[in-house]
Amino acid sequence: MNVIRKTGPALVALALALALPSFALSAEKPGKAEEPLTALVGATLIDGTGAVPIPNVTVLIQGSKIKAVGPAAAVKIPAGAKTIDVRGKFILPGFIDCHTHITTESTALEPYTDSRSLATLRALQLMNRYLGSGVTAIRDVGSPIESMMALQKAGASGYTDTIRLFPCGYLITTTGGHGDGMDGALAADGPWAFRRAVREMFKDGFHHIKISPTFTPEEARAAVEEAKTLGMHITAHGGGFSDTIPTTMTRIAVQAGVECVEHWNEMEDDVLDLMAQKGVYDVPTMTIYRESYKRDDISRFLIEKRHWSQALHETLFRKARERKIVMGIGTDAGGAMYREMYPKIFFDEMKYFVELGASPMEAIVAATRNGALILGMADELGTIEAGKLADLQVVAGDPLKSLDALGAPELVFVGGKAHKF
C-alpha cells in the first residue's frame, strides 16, 4: 500500500483545502433572526399570583414569551422594540375556563341534524368569542374526538388563530353511567377497559382525561395509574345522579388519586378533608347549577329524593374554601344555555365566587393561576412572569373595584400575538 506523507506547508495546505467547503457553508448560513419585541408600558399589573397590583409597569414580550416584567424604572426597553402605551389601564393574565364541552348542541334539534363538521365549527366560534372576552385557554372535558383532534391540529398547523385548547377527548364512563350515550362519551366496563380507554385517548393525542361515575374503585385506580404512567392529567365528575350514597363516587375518585374533581355535588366532610390533604383541585361550576334550578332542568329525583338545592352546592363551596382547596373557574353550559350564556357565564362564575365570600382578587386568581394549576401548565401559563407564555389582556377599568370591568378587553395576547378589539 502506498502512503503519501505530507509535512510542513503541504500538510497545512491540505488541511485548509479540506476545511474550506465547510467553512464556506457556515459563512453563507444566515443567523437566526431575533424575535420581535413588544413593550406594554404604563398600566397597573395584576399578575395572577394574588400579589398587590403594581402601578406603572412595563411588560416586555419577545416572540411567544414574556421577556421581562416590572416597574417602568426597572425594565429597560431595547432599541427597536414596538411600544404600546397602556397608561391608565390594567394588565392581567389571560383567563382559563377549566370546564367546557365546546361541541355541545345549542338547540333541541341539533343532536338529530348535526354533522361532525358543523359541531367543530360551532366549537371554533365559541373559542373565537372567548378570545374577544379575555379567555385565552379552555379545557374541554368531553367532546367527540374528531372535532377535538381537528381543532388541535388546525391550531398547530396555523389554520386557526384563536385560544388554547386542552381537550380530554372522550369522557370515560361506564355502561349506564353519567354521560353514557352522550356524543363525546365512551363507555368502558372493568379496570382493563378503563386502562385501554385511557391508552386510546393518549394514542389520539390527548393529555387530559376525565372519568365519570358510576365506577368501581378498581376502575378508577386503573384509569389513574394509566394516566400517570403516560404523563396525563386526570379529573373526575363529582357524583351527581349516578352517585352512590353514602359511598360517593367523589370519595372513590379522590382515594384513587385523581388530580381534580368537577362540580360540588353531595359529599361528606371527610371527603373534603381528604381532597384538602391530597391537594386535589375542584372546578365548582356554580352558575350553571343556579341557572339549571331556575329553568327546572335538575332531575326531580335529585331534588325530591336526594334533597338537592342550590344551597347544597353553595355550602360545599364555602366548606372547600375554608379548607383552602384550590378552585378554578368552569362554565359547563349546554343546550339552549350554550347559545345564550357564552361568554358572559364565565364572568358570572367569577362574580358568584365573590357572592360566596371570595374577594375579587381571589376570583381573578381562580381564573388565572388556579386554572393553570388545574391544567398542569403552571410553569407556562396563569401568571405574568418572565419566561412564561405571553397570554395576557389589557382592560380599561379596575377589576378589583368591579368585576364588570372584565369581559371586554381592549387588547389580548395569545402566545405573544396581539388581538385588538
Image: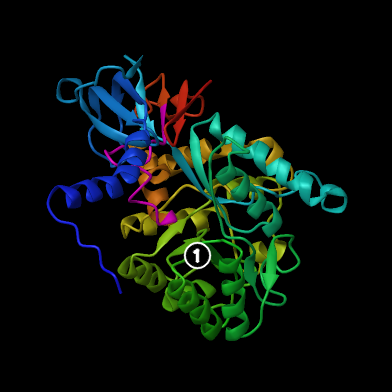
Q: In the image, what residue occupies the spot 48% across and 55% down? A: 283
- Please name the residue that numbered disc 1 is placed on: 235
Residue 71, picture quadrant: top left
Residue 318, position as x, y percentages in the image: 39, 54
Q: Residues within 10 Å of mark 1 (few under 14, many from 20)?
A: many
Residue 266, position as x, y percentages in the image: 52, 66
Query: Which sits in the foreground, 128 or 246?
Result: 128
Name, please, the residue furthest toward the left.
8
Q: In the image, what residue occupies the spot 60% across and 64% down? A: 307
Name, please, the residue furthest toward the front.
2
| Residue 243 seen from this side | yes
Residue 388 belongs to the span the image colors magenta: yes
Task: Say what secondary structure mark 1 lies in.
Answer: strand
Quadrant containing the N terminus is bottom left
Q: In the image, what residue occupies the spot 43% across and 68% down? A: 231
Instruction: Indicate whether 110 appears above or below 225.
Output: above
Tell me which colouring the rendered structure shows. Answer: rainbow
Number of labelled discs? 1
Instruction: Indicate whether 302 appears above or below 166.
Output: below
Residue 18, position as x, y percentages in the image: 30, 50
Instruction: Indicate whether 402 appears above or below 115.
Output: above
The magenta segment = 375-393
Magenta segment, principal secondary structure?
loop
Query: Which sits in the foreground, 292 or 164?
Result: 164
Instruction: Indicate whether 216 appears above or below 257.
Output: below
Residue 103 belongs to the span the image colors magenta: no
Residue 268, position as x, y percentages in the image: 44, 71
| Residue 213 seen from this side | no
Amino acid at pointer 1: Thr
